[in-house]
Amino acid sequence: MTQITLVALLVGMPFAALPAALAVALFAVAKSRLGVAVALVFTVVLAVIQIPGFIAEQHTASGAEITVLTINAAHGDADAAAIVDEVRSSDADFLAVQELTPSEETDLTAAGIEDVLPYSFTAALPVADGTGLWSRTPLTDGQTLADFGFVPVQANTVVDGVDLTVVSFHAMSPATPRHTVQWAEDLAHMRRLMDSYPGTVLVAGDFNATGDHRQFRRLTENGFIDAADASGAGLFRTFPSSGPLARLDHVVASDDVDAIEVTPVSIPNSDHLGVVAHLRLPAA
């Protein structure tokens, strides 16, 4: 079995308890006690693995509340006006866009993104390579990040006295064996950078990974959280938007940040659902 097949299969892990439960019923019909026992154990184990995602972590932060919206713009086809409308309705403080093309950036500007999030740092590029970051507070030290399959952007800001490093991130899709290698390198490289940043860190984007991938778990452990899991958001999924099967889009934060609520949102003409994360920062 190839590496890409293993990666693809892991996307379906949250659903694995369903066929295991069906196997219990089939073994029961066949009157196989051993089969029932084995299938029942697998069903319970697979179900228990998913339980932590439904349990919110204890809230300890006491700083400002912020909202982050991330969306994959689907090669620049996503409805820019709908993105700006979602920024307004969610009262987002940050917008992270992946697959940002020059035309999509032009459309976002025409739709009024600068009226609600006046500060930005972007790397708009053709097809899927570009990313962008918009902010309610001034951004400094904006830069593109090297040695990734796509081109993440990073900038610094200050919210109520808290220094933040904010990244709009897009990991390579593990669609081929070669891309799977790049995908793993992207996640590992992003984690190394996260460890190097001072202050509080927010990384929002399309990670092309779920919590069942060890590469993603390594990125979100020991000092960081996946906001959806930390908020107890459960099994909501973001891809494909027409019938979501996997949560590939995430907001990852330093573990001194509280995740209050994380929800998916629909943006017309994107093949991903967006993610809105309501967070509370540590005190300054």
Image (cartoon, helix red, strand yellow):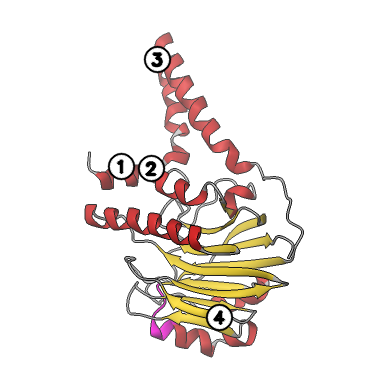
Image position of 248 with respect to 148: above or below = above
Q: Nearer the viewer, mark 4 or mark 1?
A: 4
Badge 2 or badge 4: first in the primary sequence: 2
- The mark found on residue 222 in the picture is none
Q: Is the residue under label 2 in contact with that under label 1 (CB below 8 Å)? A: yes
Residue, disc 2: 10
Sequence-earlier tag: 4 or 1: 1
Q: Residue placed at 65% from the left, 55% from the top?
A: 256
Q: Quadrant of the N terminus?
A: top left
Q: Position of residue 167 (x, y in %)?
A: 50, 68
Q: Is residue 34 left or right of residue 80?
A: left
Q: Which residues are magenta?
A: 99-104
Image position, residue 163 (x, y; %): 64, 70
Residue bearing the label numbered 1:
6
What residue do we see at 64% from left, 79% from top?
A: 136
Q: Is residue 157 left or right of residue 191?
A: right
Question: Residue beneath label 3, please?
Answer: 35
- CA gap between label 1 and label 2 equals 6 Å
Pointers 3 and 1 in contact (C-beta within 8 Å): no
Of mark 4 and mark 3, the one earlier in the sequence is: 3
The Cα–Cα distance between marks 4 and 1, rounded to whole angstroms, is 40 Å
Query: Three-letter amino acid code at disc 4?
Result: Thr
**Residue density around tag 3, few if under 14, some if 14–19, many if 20 or more, within 10 Å:** some
Query: What kind of element bears circle 4?
Result: strand
Q: Amino acid at mark 3?
A: Gly
Q: Earlier in the sequence, mark 3 or mark 1?
A: 1
Residue 231: x and y, percent?
A: 65, 50
